[in-house]
Structures are given as structure tokens and as C-alpha cells.
Image (spheres, rainbow, N blue to C red):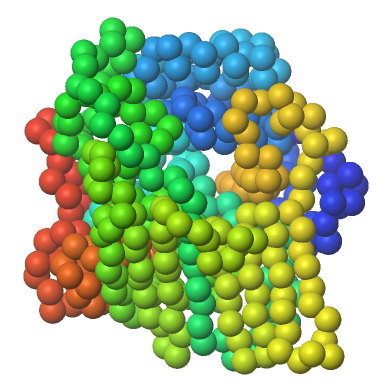
Amino acid sequence: MNSFNRRDFLKGSSALATLASFGLLGMNFKDREGPLQVALIGAGWYGKSDLFRLIQVADVEVVGLCDPDKNMLKAAGDMVATRQKSGKVPALYENYKDLLAKEKPEYVLIGSPDHWHALQAIDSLKAGAHVYLQKPISVDVIEGEAIVAATRKYNKKVQVGTQRKSTPHLIDAKKQIIDSGKLGKISHVEICCYFHMRANGNPPVELVPDFFNYDLWTGPAPLREYDGLPHRRWWRTFMEYGNGITGDMCVHMLDTVRWMLTLGWPTQITSSGGIYVQKDGKSNISDTQSAIFEYPELNVVWQHRTWGNPDDPDYPWAFKIFGDKGMLAGSTMRADYTPMDKNEKPIHFECLFEREQYPEDLTEPDIELNAAPATRLHMQNWMKAIENDTLPIADIEEGHISTASCILANISMDLGGRALKYDPKTMTVIGDKEATGKLRRPYRKGYTHPEPKSV
């Protein structure tokens, strides 16, 4: 595998000393000859971004790309050819099943819209591939249970794209503040997103262009009337394909807090919200929502608004962990420890950028520069887990807990704010048949919902 420039990288943050102690650096598949055979399903913005981060830290050959948009697919193929060592354009596929059958990739990255995650992940595992699966892992709870079951059955490693666990400044903050006990007794956490990211509008219904297989793109989801290319932001504004802002953004921050505080399943989840302000347009995801994820003597409280001002301009998408001795705030860009003791100094943690080590980042369209170091480390951790037969830091089960908890929050909101207690052993909501019935979404005709017992 390509060597990782530790010396230069360590200059950026003391977090890397922690990473080295975790064994996340310096991977080397000693007995392997030739590059790793990799494929990408979903060749849009973040799928390509994940793939390019992997190319930067591993010796790979991208053997196939898949997307139902021929224009996007061709552009992605041309970009990959300029980034991978061989200079080859990968084989291009409209249907991911053809890619899996013909190319037989060892590693599959999945960057498709949420409603396709479960089927594509399970089929990739069945085909013998390790999987890097973007969050949220599923659009319903039982899908997630099925992916976990398939991962264990086929003995593969699935790394979920909750890369805050691999974010250098947050790793450093966890070690210095949480693990050292500086916060004292922790009994309250606030997580939030105040980005104005809810796409809304009333585009007209139109004919599907020849280059786009809209029926295949829709897959198991309901088939909406076509009103323009759904890429990037438009599909996320509909519950047919995902779980709104809570499913998209809360999953990151909830997962981060769970990692920092070693939390498992919430004991109870409640949520309320709806479309309170942005009532014009077709969007059917909430513009305002609160949720409480309860743990023993600890509540994790989520809030999102897609309108108005953020509560704290420095932390518009963030977590704040409160203890009786201080508070730790964190985001993708920074972290700050504020002690209760006025004689103790605050501690600031700054985001790491790697512009000098990876100058190609600076010319990549739409790259999230602040997230690139975290994604690179996340990819390395995935490779290391495969090499050593250990669980990756964002193992599928952890990704499932974070994803399902957000889905359950939406179910609670739909049921008028009812408190839900999910039992992962029985895969039911305790004492609530109506809520249990919402753990599976109906699939469109021609598609079969995956079940944990039959993957």
C-alpha cells in the first residue's frame, strides 16, 4: 500500500500521536501482490469524494463505477482515470448487480442515495466484498438489522461513513477532555444542526431525459413524478428516499457522542416537530424537529431548524457535552473545552487540513477540505481492520444503532411524540404494535425487503 507521510501529518495535530497508538497508521498488506480491486456504487458528489480519499492512502485499482445517470457516470470515469495510478477509465455500469457479477471487486464503496443502501450493501457482501457504506446505513430499522446480519454471516468488514470518529481534532479532544475526566459527571448533551439545507421548490413535472434511468434510480422507493434530476440536494428533501435532516445530520452527531461517551442503544426515544415555517414547495421533510435520546442519568437532546439563526454561530452543526466540571463543544471545524473553574484555562482544538500533503485536494470540485483528513484516516482504519480481522472503528453495528435511533425519532414524531423503546433482540418497539409496524417500509413492486434471518 502507499506509504503514509506520518512526519508531515504529525505536524498538524497532536491527535495523530493518539491515532498512531491506536494502530491506525502505516497499513501494509504484506502478502498481497498488486493493487486492491475497488468499485464505487453511486458516482455522485460524495461517492467520488470517498473514492478519491481511498486512492490517496491505498494502492487500489478502480475496476468499476455504477450510476443510473450516464452523464454523471462518464464524468466520474474520466475523473478516476486522472486520479488512479494506472490511468485507466474503470468499467462503467448502469446496474450495480452487473458490476458485482462481472468485475468481482474485493472492496465496494457505496455512495448512492439512502433508499438504496441496504440492498446494495447486502448484495455486495454476498458477492464477497468488504464494504464502505455511507451513512445513514438504511431508511428503516429492519433494513439496518439485515445489513448487520449479512456482515456477520459473510464475515466481511463494513465501515460506515461516520468519520467524526476519525477526525483528528475530535480524537484529541476526546482523549484530553472526556477520557481524562475533566468534565466530571456528564448528564446532559445537546446536538444540533441549524444549516439552511432543506431544498424546497415547485419544479414542474417533465420528461425523463434519455441519459437517466429514473426507474432504476428510484429502485425500492415510491416512484414520484419526475421533476428534474434528483442529485445532490433534491432527493434529500423527500421522506420517500431518506429520513430528513435528522436522518442525514443527527446521525453524525449522535454517533460522535455515543463514541465519546461509550453509549449503546438509547433506553427511550421521543421526538416532535414538523413543517412549521417553510410550507411552500414540495419538500415533505421537517423544517423543525427536536428529539430526546435517553440513557441512564443522561439525555442527548437533538434540535434542528432549517430557518432562522443558529443558537451558537460558532457551532451551527455540533455537539455540546455538559459535565458538572465543564463543557466540551465540538464540530467538524473545531472543539472547545470550557471549564467551570475560573482558574482553569479553556482548551481550543483546531481542525486539521492537509493541503501540502495532498495538493490535489485543492483542485477537486466540491471537496470538503475539513473532512478530507478524517475520511483518509477512516479509509485506513477500514483497511487495517480487514488486514487484522478486527472490527473497524465505525463498524456496521455502531452505524446501525446511530441510524436506527434517528429513524425511531422520526417514527415518534409521526406518532405525535410517543415515547419509543426499541428492543434489538426482538426487533420490536416494546408494547407498541403500531410503531413496530413502521420499522419496515413497504418496497415498490419488483423489490423484496431484506430480512435479518434470510440474508
In the image, residue 338 sits, relative to residue 130, either above or below, namely: below
Image-based side of 243 in relation to 325, left or right: left
| Image mark count | 0
Tell which of 369 and 200 is nearer to you.
200
Q: Position of residue 367 (x, y in %)?
A: 62, 34
In the image, residue 253 sits, relative to residue 294, either above or below, namely: above
In the image, residue 278 sits, relative to residue 203, either above or below, namely: below
Q: Position of residue 251 (x, y in %)?
A: 44, 58
Image-based side of 212 in relation to 257, left or right: left
Q: Position of residue 439 (x, y in %)?
A: 19, 59
Q: Quadrant of residue 228?
A: top left
Determine the residue positioned at 76% across, 64% down: 349
Determine the residue positioned at 56% across, 22% down: 62
Q: Is residue 415 visible?
A: yes
Q: Is residue 103 visible?
A: no
Q: Position of residue 388 (x, y in %)?
A: 62, 52
Determine the residue positioned at 57% across, 11% down: 78
Tell which of 62 and 233 is nearer to you.
233
Q: Quadrant of the N terminus?
A: top right
Determine the residue positioned at 41% across, 21% down: 66
In the image, residue 424 sits, relative to residue 74, either above or below, namely: below
Q: Quadrant of residue 197?
A: top left
**Farthest residue toward the top?**
210
Image-based side of 453 in relation to 266, left or right: left
Tell which of 317 and 90 is nearer to you.
317
Tell which of 193 and 122 is nearer to you.
193
